[in-house]
Amino acid sequence: MDQSFWTFIAALGAAVAAAATVWYAILTRKTIRATLLSHVLTKYSSRERIEASQKLREYKKRNEELYEALERTKRKNEPLGIHATVSITSLNQEVHAARAYLSAFFWEVKTYCEAGYLDKKLVAAALGNAGHELYLELVEPLDWINTTFILNRDDYDDSVRLYFERSLKKYF
């Protein structure tokens, strides 16, 4: 057997190894995506998420005036007003904990989707309209309060709100 035969066998072996590597990478990516989606869905359906959502719904129901004032302040640049300022001081540790839990969840979902680890359309369908509205109507206003009034910072990052607004418009 001459040299060209062994060169061909070596090249063929390298090509098979490269194909196997690509195949393994594709399978690994699919496995990672499936694992992340399972993690997101498990967390979204968890008792902790449901309880945190309920706490924020109850807080909003008791403080509807605050949410209306926040909307005017954020969208129309009107002053917040004394009633809303007093309501902000009523945020207790339990409400903060619920807000932080849900905020971290939605930040995580946005990050995975934007990085390409999760399919945006699939996640939007899994969360549904209710999941999007949960963030936009209950969590995001309290995130804004936390940054602007409690932490007294003017660098609120609205990228999660913008992501879920776009997703809601695109898929629902």
Image: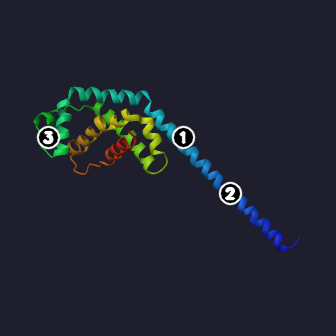
Q: Which mark is residue 80?
A: 3
Asked if one can make out residue 88 in the rendered structure from this viewpoint, the answer is: no
Q: Is residue 11 above or below residue 22?
A: below
Q: How is the image coloured?
A: rainbow
Comparing 129 with 10, the one in front is 129
Crowdedness near tag 2: few (<14), some (14–19) or many (≥20) residues, C-alpha within 10 Å = few
In this image, 169 relative to 43: left or right? Answer: left
Crowdedness near tag 3: few (<14), some (14–19) or many (≥20) residues, C-alpha within 10 Å = some
Which image quadrant: the C terminus?
top left
Where's residue 12, x and y in %?
Answer: 76, 63
The mark closer to the camera, 2 or 1, is: 2
Where's residue 45, x and y in %?
Answer: 44, 30
The three-letter amino acid code for the residue at tag 3 is Leu
Q: Residue at x 79, y 65 (%)?
A: 9
Q: Of label 2 and label 1, which has the lower sequence position? A: 2
As helix, strand or loop, the secondary structure at mark 3 comes to loop
Q: Quadrant of residue 164?
A: top left
Crowdedness near tag 1: few (<14), some (14–19) or many (≥20) residues, C-alpha within 10 Å = few
Marks 1 and 3: CB-CB under 8 Å?
A: no
In this image, 79 relative to 149: left or right? Answer: left
Which residue is denoted by mark 1 in the rendering?
35
